[in-house]
Amino acid sequence: DTAVSQTPKYLVTQMGNDKSIKCEQNLGHDTMYWYKQDSKKFLKIMFSYNNKELIINETVPNRFSPKSPDKAHLNLHINSLELGDSAVYFCASSPPASGTITDTQYFGPGTRLTVL
Amino acid sequence: GDSVTQMEGPVTLSEEAFLTINCTYTATGYPSLFWYVQYPGEGLQLLLKATKADDKGSNKGFEATYRKETTSFHLEKGSVQVSDSAVYFCALTQSSNTGKLIFGQGTTLQVKP
C-alpha cells in the first residue's frame, strides 16, 4: 500500500487554466504539507495543515488554495495557471510531534506540472 | 531567518570511493537536522536524522553528526555504490513543532562503476 499518494503524476496544461492536485495519506498522520520543487531542484514549503486546520501558509500567490476535506487528504487547487508555476509539487505527511522532537515527514512521489 | 547551505554539485565518484557532502545551517535555538535522498523520478525519503547536538544519525552506511559548534551536519559514507546515485538534501526543522522543513539546495551524486 502506498503511504502518501498523489494524483496525477504528470499534468500538462495551458496558461490561464485551473487545475487540482490530490494527495492522500494512509498513515494516520495528523499533519500534511505541500512543497514546490523548482527546475533547479530547490524545495520550498507552501502550506501545512494539522487536523484540517491551516498552520503554515508561506508567501504563496493566492491563486494557490489548499483544501483539506479530512485529515487524510490535502488537495491543492491552482487558479489561472502561469508559466512560472511549472514545477514538481510534493505532498508530505507527518505524525504529531512528541514534545520537542520533530518527526519524520513522508513524501509522495510528486506531481510534475507543466504550464504551456 | 533559518537557512541551510550545501556544497555545490554535482559530485561524481567512482564506486567504493569515500563520500562527503557538506552541510551547514543557520538557525536560532536547537533545530532538528535531516538528510533526505531523492532517487531519479521519485519523492524524497528520509535517510537519517539527528535531534540534538553530538547526536549521530546513521542508515544504509551513511552517517552524519550534529555539530553545534560548527553548525554543520556533513553526510559521509565510506564506500559508495552505483545505487547511491541520487540527489541528497540537508534540511532542518525547528522545535516549535510546526514541522516546517527548510531545505538546502540539494547535491547531486553520480557514482560510476
Image (spheres, coloured by chain):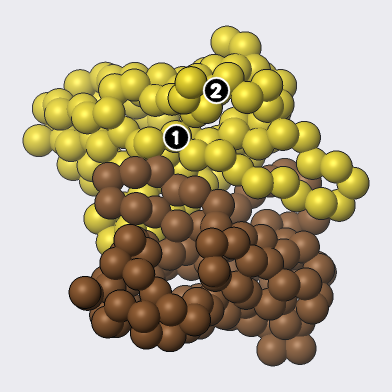
Chain colours: A yellow, B brown
In percent of the image, x 73 and y 58: which residue is there?
B94
- Label 2 chain ID: A
Q: Is residue B94 left or right of residue A105?
A: right
Q: Amino acid at mark 2?
A: Gln
Residue A108 image label: 1
Residue B84 occupies quadrant = bottom left
Around disc 1, counting alpha carbons within 10 Å, would you say few (fewer than 14), some (14 to 19), or many (20 or more)?
many
SS of the residue at dot 1? loop
Distance from Cα at disc 2 to Cα at disc 1 = 9 Å
- Residue projecting furthest to the top: A69
Residue A112 occupies quadrant = top left
Q: Amino acid at mark 1?
A: Gly
Q: Is residue B64 visible in the rendered structure shown here?
A: yes
Q: Is residue A37 above or below residue A25?
A: below
Q: Is residue B11 visible in the rendered structure shown here?
A: no
Around disc 2, counting alpha carbons within 10 Å, would you say few (fewer than 14), some (14 to 19), or many (20 or more)?
many
Q: Position of residue B17 (x, y in %)?
A: 37, 84
Kindly check if marks 2 and 1 are in contact, taking CB atoms under 8 A apart as contact: yes
Quadrant for the C terminus of chain B, please: bottom left
- The disc, 2 or 1, on the residue closer to the chain's N-terminal end is 2
Q: Which residue is mark 2?
A: A25
SS of the residue at dot 2? strand
- Residue projecting furthest to the right: A99
Q: Position of residue B25 (x, y in %)?
A: 61, 76
